[in-house]
């Protein structure tokens, strides 16, 4: 989901409550706050030497002490609109939600459910991956076994 898609969804459902569902269909307590909306850019090099850059809009959800707090879609829309001061104007960023359960994790949006009274975003887990598999994991009988072993060791991965 992109920031523009999120804003359109929130605007169209302003009066409905806003909810988050963690992977495994575990709901974030409905009393959560959105405490930060930020622009994150990550530049990195993978184990094969290729340079990458990714960017996202990260919304931090925080479970505060006030159990009666409720966030509706309209209020979140207004919070995200204010974040336009720090978000690049020319980019429709992917959205991720940051939440602390047993660890702090960032979750992309997997699915949206709109009911009579709520907008619920179902979040999904992120996973690590080798971005240079073609260099580090030899194909059977490819002739690259020596290079892969000398570069990555005998395990076949970096």
Image (cartoon, grey):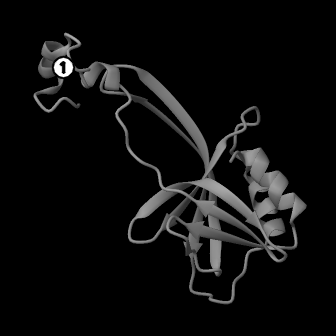
User: Does the image show residue 84?
Assistant: no
Residue 35: x, y in percent? 62, 66
The C terminus - image quarter: top left
Instruction: Give left or right: position of 131 versus 54.
Output: left
Looking at the picture, tell me which residue is in the foreground, 31 or 134.
134
Residue 108: x, y in percent? 57, 52
Residue found at x 76% / y 61%: 79
Residue found at x 35% / y 27%: 46
Work out which residue is located at the far front of the displayed protein and give it.
141
Instruction: Give left or right: position of 73 versus 29.
Output: right
Residue found at x 18% / y 19%: 148
Q: Please determine whether, in this image, residue 54 is positioned above or below residue 26.
A: above
What is the secondary structure assignment of the residue under circle 1? helix
Residue found at x 73% / y 64%: 113
Residue 91 appears in which quarter of the rendering? top right
User: Does the image show residue 99?
Assistant: yes
Residue 41: x, y in percent? 54, 38
For disc 1, the neighbor class at 10 Å (few under 14, some 14 to 19, many from 20) is: many
Q: Count how many numbered circles sit on residues in the image.
A: 1
**Residue labelled with disc 1:** 148
Residue 129 appears in which quarter of the rendering? top left
Instruction: Give left or right: position of 6 versus 143.
Output: right
Q: Please determine whether, in this image, residue 75 is positioned above or below residue 46.
A: below
Residue 26: x, y in percent? 53, 74
Instruction: Give left or right: position of 134 versus 145.
Output: right
């Amino acid at each position: 989901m992109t920031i523009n898609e999120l804003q359109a969804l929130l605007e169209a459902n302003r009066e409905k409550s806003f909810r988050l569902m963690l992977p495994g269909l575990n709901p974030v307590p409905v009393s959560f706050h959105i405490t930060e909306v930020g622009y994150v850019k990550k530049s990195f090099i993978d184990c094969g030497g290729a340079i990458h850059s990714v960017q996202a809009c990260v919304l931090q959800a925080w479970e505060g002490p006030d159990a009666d707090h409720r966030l509706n879609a309209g209020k979140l829309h207004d919070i995200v609109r204010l974040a336009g001061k720090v978000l690049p104007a020319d980019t429709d960023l992917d959205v991720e939600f940051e939440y602390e359960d047993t660890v702090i994790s960032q979750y992309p949006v997997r699915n949206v459910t709109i009911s009579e009274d709520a907008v619920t975003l179902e979040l999904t887990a992120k996973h690590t991956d080798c971005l240079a598999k073609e260099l580090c994991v030899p194909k059977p009988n490819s002739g690259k076994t020596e290079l892969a072993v000398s570069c990555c060791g005998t395990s076949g991965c970096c």
